[in-house]
Amino acid sequence: MNNTLIKSPLNYIGGKYRLLNQILPLFPNKIDTFVDLFAGGCNVGININANRVIFNDNLTYLIDLFVILKERDIDTILEHIENRIVEFSLSQINEEGYKNFREYYNQYKNPLDLFVLVAYSFNHQIRFNNSHKFNNPFGKNRSSFNNTMRLNLVRFVRKLQSMEVEFLNSDFYDFDFSILTKDDFVYCDPPYLITTGTYNDGKRGFKGWSREEEFKLLKILDSLDTKNIKFALSNVIEHKGKENTLLREWIDKNSYQVNYLDKNYANSNYQTKNRDKRATKEVLITNYKPSKRELSLFDL
């Protein structure tokens, strides 16, 4: 599968590209509309075989960027990137040029400029402050618009432009789930409640993630289940001795299917596995049992 998978051109922290070989085979075989409720870098949705994909994220400027990538031809996109690199003398060592360009972006908010800025930012991360100003530092001696990033961008744009997609910019609880039917599928990759990192607060200058948000999401998934709409939730049950008790109680109450996204726990049910108290247990939770065909692909 690795030979055919598309990688997002954005190094989105928490992205699921490296887990796609485990996640995708556990999805339903036939999907009409696929909803990527927390789209992020779009690593999952871009690789889905569905009649239509809805990418949703509450990060306004990220969605604005993806809309441009969908609408403009790749030569125009690359020309814009290369012109900005020359105009601001962007490189792995020119921190002043990066800061000048960051200030320029924060003033005008051109969507494609966000991509260029990310290419030269620390770890290629996207980060905004509470005033919605991009504030990620310079990626000195590391970050640039290199050949790998260029190739990922070209492949991503070509695939995106071949798909029927819709981009939405809303909080997950404002999404109109009434438009969905039993032939549709909802995938959720929210910030993880019990892990730590620059992305796990879910914020980036926007709204954060707490037990309240987690509870709202779980209630929405319960509602989808009552309507026979399939869903999958990426999350962490245990992390460095911490346990997401809210999530575990929800699983137990509803008897949802749990598959570990770990080479030692693949295709296992968490009740039957001996658990290391210090390990991170990342899982995919579904309200359906994967078919035999899906399980056989999962084992490849």
Image (spheres, helix red, strand yellow):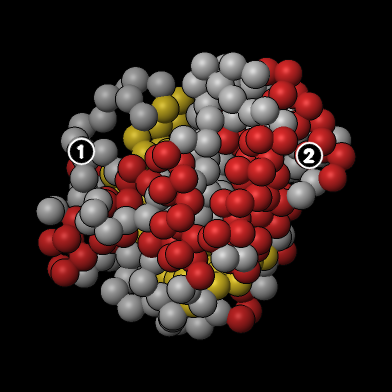
83 relative position to 300: left or right? right
Q: Is residue 278 above or below residue 49?
A: above
- Quick one: label 1, few (<14), some, or many (20+) residues within 10 Å? few
Q: Position of residue 77 (x, y in %)?
A: 60, 55
Vertical arrangement, residue 29 with respect to residue 15, above or below: below
- Which structural element holds mark 1? loop
Residue 120: image quadrant is top right
Seen from the viewer's position, the closer of residues 84 and 44 is 84
Left or right: 234, with 58 as reference point: left
- Label 2: state its secondary structure: helix
Name the residue type under label 2.
Tyr
The reply to whether residue 291 is in sight is: yes
Q: Is residue 246 above or below residue 142?
A: below
Q: Earlier in the sequence, mark 1 or mark 2?
A: 2
Q: Which residue occupies the foreground of this view, 125 or 271?
A: 125
Q: Residue at x 78, y 27 (%)?
A: 100
Residue type marked 1:
Lys
Position of residue 170 measured from the top left corner of the image (x, y, whole percent): 71, 60
Residue identifier under label 1: 263
Residue drawn at (29%, 44%) of the image? 260
Q: Is residue 159 above or below residue 83?
A: below
Name the residue tied to disc 2: 105
In the image, 101: left or right of 150?
Answer: right
